[in-house]
Amino acid sequence: MPNIPYRLLRKTLLSLALLVSVCAGATPGSAASALYFSFDRAIDGTAAPFVLASVRGLFRAENLTVTTGQAAGSPDAIARVASGSSDMALADLNALIRYRDKENGPAVKAVFVLYNKAPYAIIARKSRGIATMSDLEGKTIGIVDGDLAARLWPAIARMNNIKRDKIKPQKISAAVREPMLSAGQLDAVTGLSFLSAINLRDRGVPANDLAVLRFSDFGSEVYGHALIVNPKFAAANPDAVKAFVRATIAGIRLAIQEPARAIDDVLLQMSGGARDVELERLRAVLHDNIATDEVRRNGLGGIDTGRFDAGISQIADDYEFRKRPSASDIFDDSFLPPASARRIN
């Protein structure tokens, strides 16, 4: 028998298992619900809950046949769901809030909050004299146009008495964010904590030279990424939406229980991912954004209306609402299981 590399053999077996699951369905004589789901960017370690739901049979157990695609950011993912080209998607809740404020926009809603804390952050170099927020005065920050961390920055600066007129913003593209910071051309950048900070370490910047100033540690109340659904699909297929949410919860639990094993499955769906980098990324998002203290008290997926309203006030520092939304305008909790079924240990 030829000596087949383990990773290639495992990938082949997983692909065959997926093919069997799609063809076989969940229960003899029952038709599986078909659902098209879009990620808002390329798969990496943070996608583990959904990858596990697919390769470990969690979708199949819920009688779902899920096809996945990749959007070019949260605005594109939201547009796909609004048009019906995707039934559900993963997208930034704050991008959805801004989208829904447009005139005559489809009533796309979130049904499950994945990131209880948004991963917005300023990532800085300690070697440039930055250890905390107050050190940013007199420094140069790279800001990507349209970046949601940058959009929330005025509120964070105000709450922490940071004099923004003493900070030099430099507009940059997303493609040069980490290269410019690692090369010392910038003192700090805005971005997502589990992306930029870990990407920088992968580029050779020592971990002890990075200051990751998470907005959630400095007063931010906004939620992060959430599952969103096309309103027509939700009305016609409520059980499928509920099933997808349950499978997502099961995938999160598996990722929390065995992150290293979860990353082995994720790597098989990636092109050229590094195991140590993606494992660090998954552990960061689980600890900082998903399995927060609030989630451990109240369960996965929901929102607190008071906190939501406070987050809207923070968004309003940089955005003038046509009509200030309430939590029920943006989030539909009718697809969530009971709180007892959303607990994590």
Image (cartoon, rainbow, N blue to C red):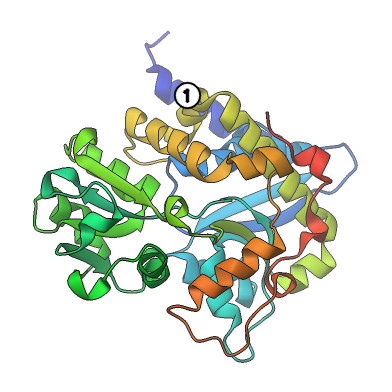
Q: Give me the residue at 35% from left, 67% from top.
A: 157
Q: Give me the residue at 57% from left, 87% from top.
A: 102
Q: Which residue is at the front of the view, 269 or 164?
A: 164
Residue 144 at x, y = what percent?
Answer: 28, 68
| 144 in relation to 49, above or below | below
Q: Is residue 19 visible?
A: no
| 200 in relation to 142, above or below | above
Q: Residues within 10 Å of mark 1 (few under 14, many from 20)?
A: some
| 308 in relation to 195, above or below | below
Quadrant of the snapshot with the N terminus: top left
Residue 243 at x, y = what percent?
Answer: 78, 48
Quarter holding residue 93? bottom right
Q: Give me the residue at 42% from left, 70% from top.
A: 155
| 136 in relation to 213, above or below | below
**Number of numbered discs visible in the structure rendering:** 1
Quadrant of the snapshot with the C terminus: top right
The amino acid beneath tag 1 is Ala
Element type where label 1 sits in the image: helix
Residue 184 at x, y = what percent?
Answer: 9, 52
Q: Residue furthest front?
A: 161
Residue 218 at x, y = what percent?
Answer: 42, 55
Q: Which residue is at the front of the view, 26 or 190?
A: 190
Q: Is residue 342 visible?
A: yes
Which residue is tagged 1? Answer: 260
